Image (cartoon, grey):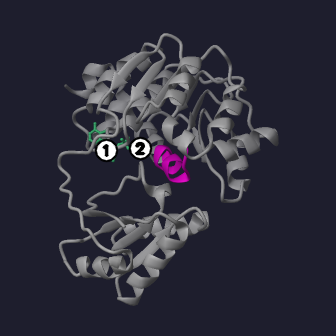
Amino acid sequence: MAFKKLSIIEPILKAVAEEGYTIPTPIQQQAIPLVLQRKDLLGCAQTGTGKTAAFAIPILQILHEQKPLAPGIKTLILTPTRELAIQIGESFVAYGKHTGIRHTVIFGGVSQLNQTNALRRGVDVLIATPGRLLDLMTQGYIRLDKLQIFVLDEADRMLDMGFIHDVKKIIAKVPAKRQTLFFSATMPPEIQKLANVLLTHPAKVEVTPPASTVDKIEQSLYFVNKQEKPELLIHLLQDKAIVSALVFARTKHGADKIARILQRYNIRAAAIHGNKSQNARQDALADFKNGNLRVLVATDIAARGIDIDDLTHVINF
Ligand code: AMP
């Protein structure tokens, strides 16, 4: 099936082709027509399935068809982490480049000035993490009374990260009459309850069974004493087949320690976690993505949704 079959308009078809996409992924095939019909959507899907385009493409199309656009934020996309917010912003740049729809991304950990300047110039689509959004709403920079479409991305992750109260506060400020798209990789009871409150007669799309592992991934397990783990890691990294490795550590301190040990062995490594500045996090991620770093050691802030091309290995330390 081609994108054209989904009744996508020319400016978006062109952008999608320029991205090199030829066939819509299963979630895109299912979700795009439903969103274009202005239905509420409950999407059970993980990152990596093409979920972002599944909501970004129809949103861009709905807004494009309303041109000339009235002022005000018409779509809000709420996502748990800064990295995901940036990635969603990049998707809007890519798919929306021929539409003239304006978007901006806001998240914490950086100065708010660029963000408030962008808001002042006017945006149609706002991509945000919950904390900074609430902060800027309280300061009077953001009003959501013109909102038409509300996207809650990675809802279960919001819960895990303790954002659910912030999310509920934001929901209280969005118009009751709206279209809601709700995405979660898993559906624990609290998330199901939130979905029931937020959605009206939703269509359901599910692409992979919750929390499944991709078949293509080959997995191995090493039984080793705690003290010997760094040595084993260094031993494994002697293998040149490990071109790039994402190493998960349980704690921020542990992540720093592993990165330091690897550096001592002349392995290009850096750590990212919640105590690093946003700039340090972005720099490390950029260096890892472009191959300057061989190993990125991360706590679970990077555990889900980070899109890295050609990652060869993941190590759960
Ligand atoms: P996501 O699940 O939204 O994070 O997307 C995962 C990756 O798939 C991203 O690198 C997208 O650029 C890519 N992608 C999304 N849709 C398509 C498609 N229809 N064809 C090829 N690649 C895609």
Residue sitting at x 44%, y 66%:
249
Tell me if residue 240 is in the magenta stretch. Answer: no
The number of discs equals: 2
The residue carrying mark 1 is 19
Look at the image and tell me in which quarter the N terminus lies.
top left
Relative height, residue 152 to residue 293 (above, below): above
Residue sitting at x 47%, y 31%:
188
Tell me if residue 88 is in the magenta stretch. Answer: yes
Q: Position of residue 174 (x, y in %)?
A: 68, 24
Query: Amino acid type of disc 1?
Result: Glu
Say if disc 1 is inside 8 Å of ligand 1.
yes
Say if residue 310 shows up in the picture.
yes
Alpha carbon separation for disc pair 1 and 2: 7 Å
**Among the two numbered marks 1 and 2 on one chain, the one whose residue lies closer to the N terminus:** 1
Report the magenta residues as a range: 80-89
The residue carrying mark 2 is 94
Q: Quadrant of ligand 1?
A: top left
Q: Position of residue 154 (x, y in %)?
A: 48, 38
Question: Secondary structure under badge 1?
Answer: loop
Q: Quadrant of residue 169?
A: top right
Q: Position of residue 35 (x, y in %)?
A: 43, 20
Image marks 1 and 2: residues in contact by CB distance under 8 Å: yes
User: Pointer 1: residues within 10 angstroms few (<14), some, or many (20+)?
Assistant: few
Query: Amino acid type of disc 2?
Result: Ala
Q: Position of residue 48 (x, y in %)?
A: 33, 43
